[in-house]
Image (spheres, rainbow, N blue to C red):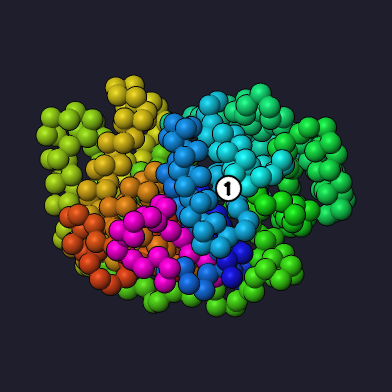
Amino acid sequence: MLALGVIADDFTGATDVAGMLVRGGLRTVQLIGVPSSSGADDIDTEAAVAGAEAVVVALKSRTTPAADAVAESLAAWHWLRAAGAKRCYFKYCSTFDSTPAGNIGPVTEALMSELGTDFTIACPAFPENGRTIFRGHLFVGDVLLSDSGMRDHPLTPMRDANLVRVLQAQCGAGTRVGLIRYDTVARGTEAVRQRIAALRSEGVRMAVADALHDDDLRTLAAGCSDLPLLTAGSGLALGLPELYERLGEARRHADAAGLDPMVGPAVVLSGSCSQATNAQVAHWRDAGRPARALDVRALLRGDGAAAAEVAAVLAWARPLIGRGDGDDAVPLIYSTAAPSELAATQSELGALEAGARVEHALAAIARELGSMGVRRWVVAGGETSGAVVQALGASALRIGPTICPGVPWTQAQRRAAPGAQGAQGGSIWLALKSGNFGAPDFFSAALRMK
């Protein structure tokens, strides 16, 4: 019985929420994009999702034009609804990555209309990873979102921590955004329900919900049990498996996170420029492990220099593949850069074009490494993860054990992809990490798991 259909606006966010559901005992499958209505996918989608209580459709819609994000999200919900989902969960980043034009507000409004509901909540809180909401303001650790590293994000700089104001600016004139405050949540499930009823009577259609602790998320999940649509980061999913079992809509399983043993050569690819990922790259390099930086300026020249740089990186990596089992022999290929260096690079072509060229290069590298037999992949950055997963021809992911909060290992069911000879048969395992997640030793910690 499919209890929940999830639409995630990037690939790492999809594995994040899928991992949370698996931790709670729901068998969960992640699909890479909306399955083809023509049946052109090379995997049997029905077989892939058989037995799942939750299905997550991973999109790359976080930074696309708002109209495209709406269209893709509605297509995902149409597929999920046809597969049997009665409830919808729109998952976005715990740092509310967006722009003044969207995409969180427009997608939420479109899904509300599609599901015929006049109210939903917005709650990107993830206390386990230091993301909390107090009086409608989002904190990252001890600082406001607007004072964190997200202030200088290359694609979605977040310079306002007031989520009510941010979300209101993205919504149409007919949508009012309100607040469910921390003191209401602290009074329990019934207080949340009463606050929702009061907001509805005032004509409020969306409400940012405060959450300081995991118990707040459980309270919110129970208080919103009659809503067909939830919008949130992955944290709110913490309380859903137990709630759905209590409502008779799902059954939890102790072995929900089971994967086949992870084997084969490994590689680490990093395209994120977040503070956390910068620290992880530095930790890897400081330990003397093999690492090679992409020459991003060569990728931007577009005169054959990009192809030459990809070839040079592959020539460096080839003798390292399968050289040994320890992470000391695993190559790291990265485009991670400090904020000042990133700003200088983006000034040449603009953030979107510069990012697209880096993703294209990392996808080409991934295809070739796959043909060399790489089977374990640790990937940092949402856009990078999307490019790599698509390059490897992965259509569906089984969700496995958690490496750190927000990042599980996954096992791919793959379709053949042009040029991806290594994606023909056999399994691959992927750890898809949001740029902001993980301790400095994340890369090696992930590879130690078998």
Which residue is nearer to you in this view: 65 or 180? Answer: 65
The location of residue 196, given as percent across then percent down, is: 81, 43
Q: Main secondary structure of the magenta part?
A: loop
Kindly state the secondary structure of the residue where label 1 is placed. strand
Snapshot quadrant of residue 307: top left
The location of residue 395, given as percent across then percent down, is: 36, 60
Taking the image as shown, residue 312 lies to the left or right of residue 425, namely left
Snapshot quadrant of residue 309: top left
Q: Specify the segment rendered in magenta.
A: 27-47
Position above or below: 113 against 213? above
Q: Residue furthest top?
A: 347
Which residue is nearer to you in this view: 357 or 232? Answer: 232
Report the residue at 36% width, 55% height from top: 36
Taking the image as shown, residue 60 lies to the left or right of residue 216, namely left
* Quadrant, the C terminus: bottom left
Residue 36 falls inside the magenta stretch: yes
- Report whether residue 85 is seen: yes
Taking the image as shown, residue 143 lies to the left or right of residue 274, namely right
The location of residue 268, given as percent across then percent down, is: 33, 55
Q: Amino acid at mark 1?
A: Phe
Find disc 1 in the rendering and name its residue.
90
* Quadrant, the N terminus: bottom right
Report the residue at 55% width, 25% height from top: 100
Report the residue at 83% width, 54% height from top: 189
Q: How many marks?
A: 1
